[in-house]
Amino acid sequence: FSQILFKNPNEPPLVFHWFPFVGSTITYGMDPPRFFQENRAKYGDCFTFILLGKKTTVYVGPRGNDFILNGKIRDVCAEEIYTVLTTPVFGKDVVYDCPNSKLMEQKKFMKIALTTEAFRSYVPIISDEVTSYFKRTADFKGQSGIVNICPKMAQITIFTASHALQGKEIRDKFDETLADLYHDLDMGFSPINFMLHWAPLPWNNRRDHAQRTVAKIYMDTIQSRRAQGESDAQDMMYHLMSSTYKNGVKIPDHEIAHMMIALLMAGQHSSSSTSSWIMLRLASRPDIMEELYQEQVKALGADLPPLTYEDLAKLPLNQAIVKETLRLHAPIHSIMRAVKQPMPVPGTKYVIPTNHVLLAAPGVSATDAQHFPQPELWEPHRWEKESPLAPSMVRNEPDEEEEEDKIDYGYGLVSKGAASPYLPFGAGRHRCIGEQFANVQLQTIVAMTVRMFRFRNVDGSNKVSGTDYASLFSRPLEPANICWEKRERHWE
Ligand code: HEM
């Protein structure tokens, strides 16, 4: 009754719940996309639910995406939500452990290191890592077999990202100490740590030890690089070592080290979840995997020469695979912001008060039939313009005519309008800086895997595994077994 009696008419409708503090925490936590869809059907695009005692207002659809992700700095704040989780993992003075203006500068440094020239150097690094991984890994011995693909993709992601972004010295350490240390750091990212981040629990002690040790490894590497002098390497660490803040201060070594951790952690979960989903989707559609192979033969020649950055642009289906997989399986299902001053929702009577948290869920519009016909169907060909399944009003990648519609947050121009139904990389001032890197990395991993294997589901069906929402980033439920068979070539 209290939910009805004390309802403020200017607040969005509150999702019905039985218990005060728990609210809708359990139904939300078990399957966030389903929770959003069911409540959207009941309450409309904007509604509030109780998440661990906190009034959390969801606003879905392109307008909701824009309202939250493009929120002004005086209205919304990301660091207030995320810092308890990220600071113990990344370390001090970076990302959310500093004023937003400093994060904008840090993002700018990272973004400008990701040039075309850098990407050109990354494609051979990534393709060599992928081929050598498959060739040396015991689970891929023989002509065919069955494998739980997720841990394999997690390893490929970390080897490729660390080698490309952080250089060979760091990559080689992943065969020794770094893999275990990053595993310990990762435990700090468990959702329970939104509440227990401070507690002297065994996993938090391991997290803190790992953070100190990893940061020291990076700082030692920075120092030994300085001692060696100039280099023409294109990795991110070199770039940051020669970058200076607007106030004239060079980035201190501990901040470079912490940014290295942040970069790898930000990219690791999202890219490895996405590459696992891609492989599972390909196993469920061997016909598309074959099409991808033929696309390479046609575009690059039957002998399939070593892959280059320029080749990726010649493989539209290979690109569409990544896009379509992120449409259905975006790893970040909820993006949260604290509300700093009452925010009227345009076109409605609602005003969101400061004791609410805002939650954007761009995955809802990405799976809405209004924008994507037959939304549940994984169909990479829908991204071809003439397809009857082609998405409508997708404004994620503004063309040049929209140049004046962009805003400079300090880390490069970002489209002003976030009113798009397709935003797997977010929007506004917190938008992902790793989008192009992730695309290069994922497209290269897919292209090389397709050269080496045919996949299918173990039972020959076209089913895909369910989604695991237990950690912050959603990913396939494991074991996610697929059947692999080697193609005759590319194994010499
Ligand atoms: C931010 C998605 C890969 C670095 C974000 C955000 C999303 C996202 C949705 C916005 C978060 C928010 O608004 O709170 C993804 C996906 C990826 C991916 C789907 C891969 C498929 C990467 C990679 C890197 C990276 C590879 C690093 C090389 C970052 C950084 C931010 C960010 C630094 C900024 C955080 C902020 O400003 O608050 N990403 N990301 N991401 N991402 Fe990514």
Image: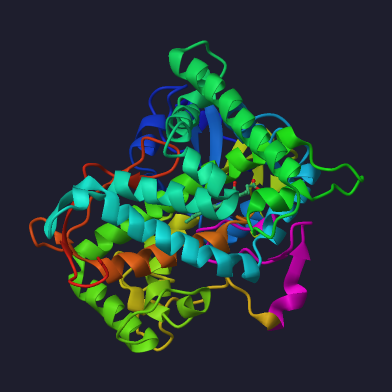
Front-most of residues 251 and 16? 251
Rendered image quadrant of residue 364? bottom left
In the image, residue 490 sits, relative to residue 152, either above or below, namely: below
- Residue 410 visible at all: yes
**Is residue 221 shown left or right of residue 439?**
right
Front-most of residues 287 and 464? 287
In the image, residue 264 sits, relative to residue 235, either above or below, namely: above
Is residue 421 part of the magenta span, yes or no? Answer: yes
Farthest-out residue, right: 247
In the image, residue 302 sits, relative to residue 186, either above or below, namely: below
Farthest-out residue, left: 459
In the image, residue 342 sits, relative to residue 232, either above or below, namely: above
Location of the C terminus (image quadrant): bottom left
Farthest-out residue, top: 200
Front-most of residues 52 and 287? 287
| Residue 368 placement (x, y as % from top left) | 40, 64
**Is residue 179 shown left or right of residue 337?**
left
Residue placed at 34% from the left, 60% from the top? 131
Residue placed at 40% from the left, 47% from the top? 39
Residue numbers of the magenta segment: 401-430
**Is residue 277 shown left or right of residue 141?**
right
| Residue 399 placement (x, y as % from top left) | 64, 80
| Residue 330 placement (x, y as % from top left) | 43, 55
Is residue 90 part of the magenta span, yes or no? Answer: no
Location of the N terminus (image quadrant): top left
| Residue 329 placement (x, y as % from top left) | 38, 56
**Is residue 269 shown left or right of residue 488?**
right
